[in-house]
Image (tube, rainbow, N blue to C red):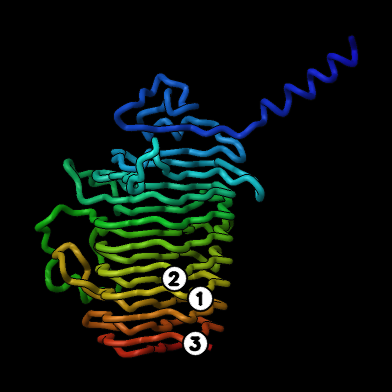
């Protein structure tokens, strides 16, 4: 009898640790369901914030469907071998385009804070203005990856996403002639992917951004904003960034970044009055050990900078090599002061 009980315990414990798939469908789902099958899906993306996700768990959206709202992850941790995954897939045998997350009115389509070992792929994000303006919001952004004052965010994979039409303001908004001449813009904008760490004791590290299609934004496609090099070990590869109102890719106060095999076209775009209208294909500020290679920088536009790539102030060991640059208002490469 004792041996049977021990065997039963060993059988039960692995079952309790099994990874789960949570299904979401905007028309077939109900938030009272358990979400554990396509027959019992959740409805609202807001449910995700209340789930206690474990290593290997997956959030599955339905291809061909549009979800209103945002995905919020805070303090969720997978493992090196078992990431927590957010993705979309076909609900039945019919091939459909990736699920759309429409975060109009909201700050972010996907918000990640103090998480590790997270993978996000095969989702389309869009957030075009608002129906009721929230003055407390400072931006609208496809993905925000951030950290609390003493937190840590690491081992994040962002791949195969489409981020298109992200604007804080509604169509018809006019920025004014002087706004484009400010250093980085002073008004509220829409962005693609942002890594933000303003806490010197916290770290964002080991983030991989690949194979994303980012277009029609008010400002920057991919932006890293650190403090004292507290964002590091980042790889940005094989992305297409086009027709964005600001720079294609920008990074400040970062270290150990590899940017390769990306195509940036028409940064500083002015095709929408909500766009900033100025931006290099890529530029760095206060950055250390950045390798920029095998990228294409095309058609950068704007009254200042707007080069294919430029190294701004206070950088060290930034290498630009084997890139293709053409039709950029500010030329191939611009290098400013206090760099070594």
Q: CA distance from mark 3 to mark 2?
A: 18 Å
Q: Residue at x 36, y 23 (%)?
A: 30
235 and 97: which one is in front?
97
Q: Where is 28 relative to 294, above or below?
A: above
Secondary structure, mark 2, is strand
Reply above or below: 49 against 40: below
Sequence-first tag of 3 and 1: 1
Which of the two discs, 1 and 2, labels the residue nearer the N terminus?
A: 2
- Spatial CA distance of label 3 from label 1 is 17 Å
Numbered circle sitting on residue 321: 3
The residue carrying mark 2 is 251
CB-based contact (under 8 Å), mark 3 and mark 2: no
Relative image position of residue 278 (x, y in whole percent): 25, 75
Disc 1 secondary structure class: loop
Give coordinates of residue 313: x percent, y percent.
43, 82
Mark 3 burial class by Cα count in 10 Å: few <14, some 14-19, many 20+: few
Q: Are marks 1 and 2 in contact (CB under 8 Å)?
A: yes
Query: Which of the image's four quarters has the N terminus?
Result: top right
Instruction: Give the x, y percent position of residue 183.
Output: 29, 74
Q: How many marks?
A: 3
The residue wearing badge 1 is: 287
Q: Earlier in the sequence, mark 3 or mark 2?
A: 2
Name the outermost residue toward the top.
Answer: 1
Question: Who's the residue at 48% across and 87% down the image?
Answer: 322
């Amino acid at each position: 009898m004792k041996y049977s009980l021990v065997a039963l315990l060993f059988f039960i414990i692995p079952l309790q640790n099994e990874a789960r798939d949570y299904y979401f469908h905007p028309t077939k789902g109900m938030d009272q369901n358990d979400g554990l099958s396509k027959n019992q899906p959740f409805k609202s993306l807001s449910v995700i914030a209340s789930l206690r996700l474990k290593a290997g768990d997956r959030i599955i959206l339905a291809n061909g469907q549009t979800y209103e709202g945002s995905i919020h992850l805070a303090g969720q941790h997978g493992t090196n071998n078992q990431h927590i995954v957010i993705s979309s897939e076909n609900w039945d045998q019919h091939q459909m385009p990736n699920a759309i997350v429409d975060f109009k009115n909201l700050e972010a389509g996907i918000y990640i804070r103090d998480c590790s070992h997270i993978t996000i792929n095969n989702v389309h994000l869009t957030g075009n203005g608002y129906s009721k303006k929230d003055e407390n919001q400072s931006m609208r952004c496809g993905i925000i990856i951030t950290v609390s004052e003493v937190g840590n965010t690491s081992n994040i994979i962002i791949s195969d996403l489409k981020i298109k039409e992200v604007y804080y303001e509604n169509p018809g908004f006019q920025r004014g002639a002087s706004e484009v001449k400010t250093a980085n813009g002073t008004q509220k904008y829409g962005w693609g992917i942002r890594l933000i760490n303003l806490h010197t004791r916290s770290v964002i590290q080991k983030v991989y951004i690949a194979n994303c299609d980012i277009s029609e934004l008010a400002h920057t496609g991919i932006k890293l904003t650190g403090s004292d090099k507290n964002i590091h070990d980042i790889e940005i590869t094989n992305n297409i960034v086009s027709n964005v109102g600001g720079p294609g890719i920008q990074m400040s106060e970062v270290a150990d970044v590899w940017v390769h095999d990306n195509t940036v076209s028409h940064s500083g775009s002015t095709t929408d009055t909500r766009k900033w209208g100025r931006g290099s294909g890529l530029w760095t500020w206060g950055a250390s050990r950045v390798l920029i290679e095998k990228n294409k920088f095309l058609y950068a536009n704007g009254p200042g900078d707007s080069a294919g790539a430029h190294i701004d102030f206070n950088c060290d060991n930034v290498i630009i090599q084997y890139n293709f640059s053409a039709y950029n208002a500010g030329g191939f490469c611009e290098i400013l002061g206090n760099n070594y």
